[in-house]
Image: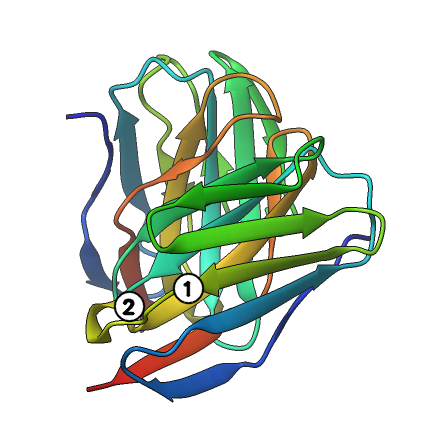
Amino acid sequence: EAQVTQNPRYLITVTGKKLTVTCSQNMNHEYMSWYRQDPGLGLRQIYYSMNVEVTDKGDVPEGYKVSRKEKRNFPLILESPSPNQTSLYFCASSFGTSYNEQFFGPGTRLTVL
Amino acid sequence: KQEVTQIPAALSVPEGENLVLNCSFTDSAIYNLQWFRQDPGKGLTSLLLIQSSQREQTSGRLNASLDKSSGRSTLYIAASQPGDSATYLCAVSPGAQKLVFGQGTRLTINP
C-alpha cells in the first residue's frame, strides 16, 4: 500500500531532551516536507527536501533540523525541544514538481513539558 | 505573501442537504489547489486536486471548482451524509513544492 508513515504517533517529552520523529514513504517520491499544525494558525511548513541531500527552510524552521540521506526517509530532529514546539506534526511527500498531489502521513502529536 | 481564507469556519447541516464550502486566496500565481479532509486527531486525506489550468474536478459526490483570476475555489458536497463530518482544508501551491493552507471549515452533518 502506498503510504507515508511517521513514528512515533504520540510523544511526551521534557524540555531540552533531543528527539527525532521519523518519516518514510514508499512511493519513490522526490519531494518530502514537514508541517506543524496549531490551533488558530493552521498548517505551516517547517522544512522541505527536493531530493536526497537537498533540503531548505520553510516558514517556521527555527528549532528544527532535518536530513535527507535516503530518498524514502526524511527525519525531523528537535535538538533541544521547548514547550512552544508542542504541536501536531505532519510529513508529506509528492513527485518532483509543484503540479503534483501531496500525500500526508498520519501525524505525530508532540507534547513538550 | 499568499494567504488562504476559508469561510465559514464551522457549518452544521441536516443529512441529505447539498452544501458548498468556500476558499479564497490572495495571489493568483498558483500551480494547483488541493482540498483535504481531516478527521479529529487524524492525518489529511486528499480529496481533489485542481491544476491551475483547470476549472473543476469531480470525485463521486464531491465537485471542486477553481476561478484563479478571482482567487476563489468552492467544494460542493452533494447529498451529505453523517460520515462527511470532518474538517475540510483548502491549500494552494505557490511553487517550490509548498502548500499554503486555510484554517479549515469544520463540517457537521446531523442525522
Q: Is residue B60 visible?
A: yes
Q: Which chain carries label 1?
A: B
Q: Which chain carries label 2?
A: B
Report the disc number at residue A109.
none
Quarter assignment of residue A105 = top left
Q: Residue at x 32, y 69 (%)?
A: B79
In the rendered image, the vertical position of residue A2 relative to residue A5, given as above or below: above
Mark 2 is surrounded, within 10 Å at the Cα level, by few (under 14), some (14 to 19) or many (20 or more) other residues, namely some
From the image, tell me which residue sits under label 2: B84
> Are discs 1 and 2 less than 8 Å apart at CB?
yes
In the rendered image, the vertical position of residue B109 relative to residue A30, given as above or below: below
Report the disc number at residue B77.
1
Q: In this view, does B9 lie to the left or right of A110?
A: right
Q: Where is residue B52 in the image (x, y as percent from the top left)?
A: 70, 34
The answer to which of A52 and A2 lies nearer the viewer is: A2
Q: Position of residue A44 (x, y in %)?
A: 56, 54
In the rendered image, the vertical position of residue B97 relative to residue A27, given as above or below: below
Q: Which amino acid does label 1 sit on?
A: Ile
Q: Position of residue A29 (x, y in %)?
A: 40, 17
Q: Where is residue B91 in the image (x, y as percent from the top left)?
A: 58, 51
Q: Which residue is drawn at 22% across and 76% down?
A: B82
Q: Can residue A62 be seen in this view?
A: no
The answer to which of B48 and A43 lies nearer the viewer is: B48
